[in-house]
Image (cartoon, grey):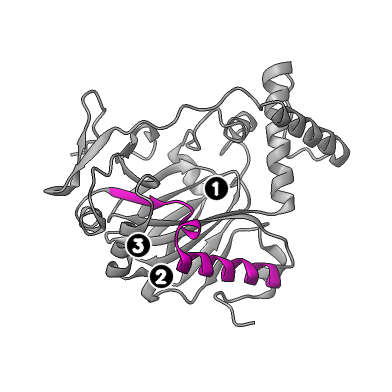
Amino acid sequence: MTGLLNWSDDHRQNFTKKTLLFSHKLAGSDLFTDEALIALIDRYPPEKLEVFSMGYDPSNWGQWYLGRRSGLDGRALMEGVRAGRLWLNLRKVNHADPAFNELCGRMFAELEFETDQKTLKPDLGLLISSPNAHVFYHLDIPLVMLWQVRGIKKLYVYPPKTPFVTNPNLEGIALRESDEQLPYEAAWDEAAMVHDLKPGEMITWPQNAPHRIVNHGMVNVSMSIEFMTPAAIWRANVLYANGCLRRWFGLKPEIDKRFLTWEAVRIAYARAIKAFGGFNGAKSPLVPRFSLDANKPGVPQFDDGVDVPKKAA
């Protein structure tokens, strides 16, 4: 089949197991021009579009703020991205736009053909972000692919193990009792895979690997695509069960100590808990902390009492 990605034997054999870099054929696609993105933003469900701004210190993840779109149209939002420090997230754009739904279908048909792995729950998120904006150190429960279409971003990917992430950290995210952001130490960068992701490149990493992103000095357009495989769902359920065992019974399970029979019991336990309403530790939803102004769309108007990010002198 004619695909979107280059594939080597290493890619086929180690997809979802290792950090892998691909080249892809979407850089320069008409889907990602400024005018196409403006039109997409204007037809995307307005209540689903997320606008973020952030601080400058990579260890201060509390300065990751959700904002209000304030009625700005696609052209004004794109102007704000160019001029400011914003991060637009169009979640599940494959569910909202036929062209991206078709593209998502092509992507996952190719993945299944090349790797012989069944993929589930695809979620194509479109990211449009400002020059020098960044994403704090965090991890995702699903598997992730990051497709770079415009601009360059520096990506740091860390091993999914202690000290970079602890078992209680992982479980808290799986249980939705905490955000995806994690404590970060600059010394950990020595153990990270660091790469300047360029247009026409896609990278994927093992499930739950912590990572952070720093844009170069230009607008970036990327697709962050989450998905599951049967093995990934198995791991997510084990994490959920481990979290309940730790919190309710004081046990200290470790995700990397593999006993498959015991894991099967834990998965049944996790499903039973979910069937009866789930773990009562839902995290609080993000509350908007700033508004945008059509006259200065790149300058967040922070609410009173917000710890306003300040660039170091």
Identify residue type, mark 2: Pro
User: Marks 1 and 2, how far apart in space?
Assistant: 22 Å
Frontmost residue, 72 versus 251: 72
Residue at image position (66%, 62%) is 15
Identify residue type, mark 1: Tyr
User: Magenta span has 113?
Assistant: yes
Residue 119 location, quadrant: bottom right
Identify residue type, mark 3: Leu
Q: Above or below — where is 171 with respect to 114?
A: above
Q: Which residues are magenta?
A: 86-114
For mark 2, does the 10 Å Cα neighbourhood hold few (<14), some (14 to 19), or many (20 or more) residues?
many
Q: How many marks?
A: 3
Compared across the picture, whether 159 is left or right of 200 comes to: right
* Sequence-first disc among 1 and 2: 1
x and y, in percent, of residue 93 in the image: 46, 57
Asked whether the beta carbons under mark 3 and mark 2 sit within 8 Å of each other, the answer is no
Does the image show residue 112?
yes
Q: Above or below — where is 276 with respect to 193?
A: above
